[in-house]
Image: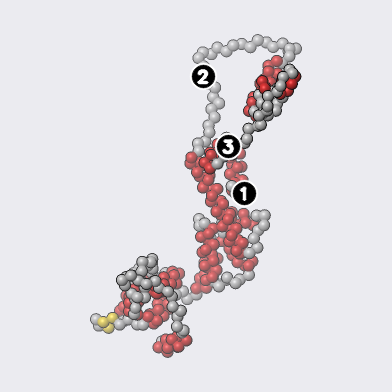
């Protein structure tokens, strides 16, 4: 072991200094401290990176090897890590005196005890088992990239990375990307498209939930209203040879209602004036027609008005058409 340490020291170069902001009155810099380590090998690398960063930034506090080792051991308080700490302290205790090893030697022992022996194989196994689940596409892409790096597959062929990534996505999202107009042919394109489609779907779900929580389903009551008494006037028998005046009157009234809704003249059926001011009628009577008013401009909805307008339109749709609407929104976005 001593020969290995000497060889390691001979090969090592002076580390590049990392800037540490000046402390105030010798106090520790207020940054997030490392999380406690419980012996989980998959979390060991992150634990040691946090330790190295914290000790580097606060090197004015932890100036010697004993202080650094004591700081690391103070965070090994759970499960296998706590047992390992107890063994190390017992090993280096001589009578009433604790003689800890050097910082470099301590890190070598620590790495040998907790660093995964086959980190690349473990990463490959995790890639095969990986599934998106309830995670957002952004979170999933980040996790996938980290495992890809751990498994040393960053430089693998694009089609291999795309195949691995697509198998980890939810079935609906993977099919949506494959069936898109221009499916991506690079792994970065798959990352970007998955995040885009997933975010769009989540916004749609949020909109739907807001609509359903704030809106009320319209109800129609076709039950005839009760009336006092049961008297109904009798209808006289119709002459089969007589003109159907009621039908003509009904058709005329429907036409008037339609023209009224569209804001058109009853006489000439055009925009900009009412029947009493109709220029065609005035010309027939030898009068000077009044100037025509241009048709009303279409109202432009803004902000909350747009939401209320869309909400009202959806509420008026039959249930079958609502299902078709939401399905279209899920497929094409909103």
293 horizontally vs 112: left or right: right
Please report whichever mark, 3 or 1, sits nearer to the chain's N-terminal start.
Answer: 3
Disc 2 packing (10 Å; few <14; some 14–19; many ≥20): few
Q: Residue at x 57, y 71 (%)?
A: 153
Is residue 106 visible in the rendered image? The answer is yes
Q: Residue 28, position in %: x, y?
A: 34, 70
Give me the C-alpha separation between circle 3 and circle 1: 19 Å
Of 36 and 297, the residue lying toward us:
297
Q: Name the residue under label 3.
A: 313
Is residue 51 visible in the rendered image? The answer is no
Task: Tell me the quarter of the image containing the N terminus.
Answer: bottom left
313 horizontally vs 237: left or right: left
Q: Residue at x 55, y 41 (%)?
A: 302
Circle number at residue 211: none
278 in relation to 229, above or below: below
Q: In which quarter of the image is residue 306?
A: top right
| Mark 2–mark 1 CB contact (< 8 Å) | no
| Mark 3–mark 2 CB contact (< 8 Å) | no
118 in relation to 271, above or below: below
Mark 3 or mark 2: which is in front? 3
Q: Mark 2 points at which residue?
A: 226
| Mark 3–mark 1 CB contact (< 8 Å) | no
Q: Residue 174, position in %: x, y?
A: 60, 57
Q: Name the residue under label 1.
A: 332
Q: Residue 253, position in %: x, y?
A: 66, 21
Give me the C-alpha separation between circle 2 and circle 1: 48 Å
State the SS at label 1.
helix
């Amino acid at each position: 072991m001593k020969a290995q340490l000497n060889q390691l020291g001979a090969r090592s170069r002076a580390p590049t200094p990392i800037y540490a902001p000046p402390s105030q009155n010798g106090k520790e810099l207020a940054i997030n401290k490392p999380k406690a380590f419980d012996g989980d090998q998959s979390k060991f690398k992150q634990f040691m990176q946090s330790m190295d960063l914290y000790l580097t930034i606060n090197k004015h506090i932890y100036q010697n090897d004993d202080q650094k080792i004591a700081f690391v051991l103070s965070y090994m308080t759970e499960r296998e890590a706590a047992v390992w700490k107890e063994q190390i302290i017992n090993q280096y205790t001589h009578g009433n005196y604790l003689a800890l090893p050097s910082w470099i030697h301590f890190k070598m022992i620590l790495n040998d005890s907790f660093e995964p022996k086959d980190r690349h194989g473990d990463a490959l196994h995790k890639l095969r088992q990986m599934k998106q689940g309830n995670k957002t596409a952004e979170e999933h892409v980040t996790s996938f990239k980290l495992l890809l790096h751990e498994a040393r597959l960053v430089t693998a062929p694009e089609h291999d990375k795309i195949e691995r990534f697509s198998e980890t996505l939810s079935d609906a999202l993977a099919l949506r990307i494959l069936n898109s107009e221009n499916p991506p042919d690079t792994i970065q394109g798959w990352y970007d498209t998955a995040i885009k489609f997933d975010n769009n779907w989540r916004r749609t779900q949020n909109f739907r939930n807001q609509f359903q929580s704030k809106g009320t389903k319209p109800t129609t009551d076709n039950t005839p209203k009760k009336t006092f008494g049961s008297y109904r006037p009798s209808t006289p028998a119709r002459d089969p040879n007589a003109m159907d005046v009621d039908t003509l009157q009904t058709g005329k009234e429907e036409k008037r209602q339609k023209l009224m809704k569209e804001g058109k003249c009853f006489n000439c059926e055009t925009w900009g004036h009412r029947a009493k001011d109709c220029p065609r009628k005035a010309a027939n009577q030898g009068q000077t027609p009044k100037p025509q008013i241009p048709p009303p401009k279409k109202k432009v909805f803004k902000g909350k008005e747009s939401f209320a307008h869309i909400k009202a339109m959806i509420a008026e749709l039959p249930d079958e058409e609502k299902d078709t609407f939401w399905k279209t929104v899920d497929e094409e976005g909103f």
